Amino acid sequence: MPDIAPPIREGVARRRLYVFSPLPPQRNGLADYIVEYLPLLARDFQVCVVSESGHAAETRRAMEQMPHVEVVSEAHFLARQPDRQAQVLYNVGNNGDCAYMLDHVHQFPGAVIIHDVSLFYLHQVAAQQSRSNAIMGAWLAADDYAVPTDFLHGDGSLAKTPGLVYQECLMVKRLCQSAQGVMVHTAYAERRLRGGATGVALGHSQGRPLLRMPHFVLPPPPPTDAAQVAEVLARYAIQPEDFLILVPGFLSGNKMLYEILMAFREASAQGHPDMKLLFAGEEREQEYRLSERINALWPTGIRPQVTGYLSAQDLDILLGRADLSLVLRFPTYGESSGILPRAAMGGGDVITVNIGAYPEFESAAVQTIPVGAGAVAALTDGLLRSHAQRGRGEARQSRQNKEATQAKALSPQALYPRLRQWLDDVWAMQ
């Protein structure tokens, strides 16, 4: 988390900006995202982050290093309304930590950053939390999405969920209709958004500014103390001769974990005992029982490891040591990956998928594979190819330097003027 309060711009009238988002200490990529921009926003706005009810106190403690950012509760925010001198910014993704925003986003319209072009799961969680499951049928109908009748109860609640529903561009239209401006990260997300929000005027000339701004790439971490690097590598028994295959990030059900296990088992069995597979993140057991599957496939002997939640510094140490990082997703919901450029900056090889927004990130370190029936075979080939080329290509430090230079244009500081201009454009059109 940025820990240096930026200088306030003297003599400049700063309007209030209420920010709704998952926030520290929540373990959520959306919290990590907004935290990088809050110090920059605080130079130009009176920033008030609105914490979900019951979380304000822990959020204040987590954000003590940002004295120029006020933390308020939902009740405090509501008590200040109407606040006609303030703008509202919503940082929204397809996860349950955003459910508290949905009532506010329609009652208090503002600028909306949309990280995922399917928000079906978010709305499903919100309906369950409010015990209003019957509203799902009406929401789907409003999106002109026809669900087979046997998937709906008579009251409109879902009897079961067709798996492909999660890949459709659903519920974004509801947000766009209320939003005063919309921001997405990729060309793919913009295309899907426009298709999913049919009939909603989008664009500056239409009175609802639409910004396409890439996800930021943080600069490479400062050099880490050699003793700390040694401690992290020793923690997972990583030896100098190991060919380390890393799966970084939260281990959710769409990270192709089964395909990774199958490809690793096939590749390592071809006379490569030096291959080591490390899942560097927190397991989401309700989505995929990864540890259980590993124990079933490797009942004895050396097996793949799961680290659990890692600090950013520990993860960067592992990315800087990995020979190959796997950043895979299927299905993809239009999200862009913050971990993909970070893995490339580690200096090793990277494999990702050839669908959604993932091919839009260009790097010599990154190769893509198809999804579907041929995914395991393609991934196995990728593992073997990377292993065979180990030590033959460009030196790791040289690759790291090239990626770091490329990333400068995508730093939060470099991208922020576009975010600020978009907020100003949205404000001007209210």
Image: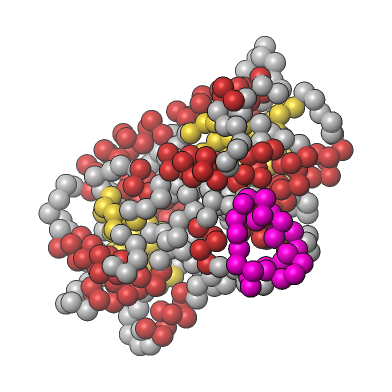
Residue 102 located left or right of residue 77: left
Residue at coordinates 60% horizontally, 22% vertically from top-left?
425
How many numbered callouts?
0
Closest to the observer: 391 or 129?
129
Q: Nearer the viewer, residue 13 or 203?
A: 203
Residue at 51%, 63% in the rendered image: 164
> Relative to residue 320, is residue 292 depicted above or below?
below
Name the residue at the bottom extreme.
300
| 253 in relation to 26, above or below | below
Q: In what quadrant of the picture does the C terminus appear?
A: top right
124 lies left or right of 277 = right
Indicate how the structure is coloured in the image. secondary structure
Q: Position of residue 323 (x, y in %)?
A: 26, 58
- Magenta stretch: give its range: 133-158
Q: Nearer the viewer, residue 160 or 76?
A: 160
In percent of the image, x 31 and y 66: which residue is there? Answer: 375
Q: Residue at x 55, y 36 (%)?
A: 183
Q: Is residue 11 magenta?
A: no
Quadrant (top left, top right, bottom left, bottom right) of the N terminus: top right
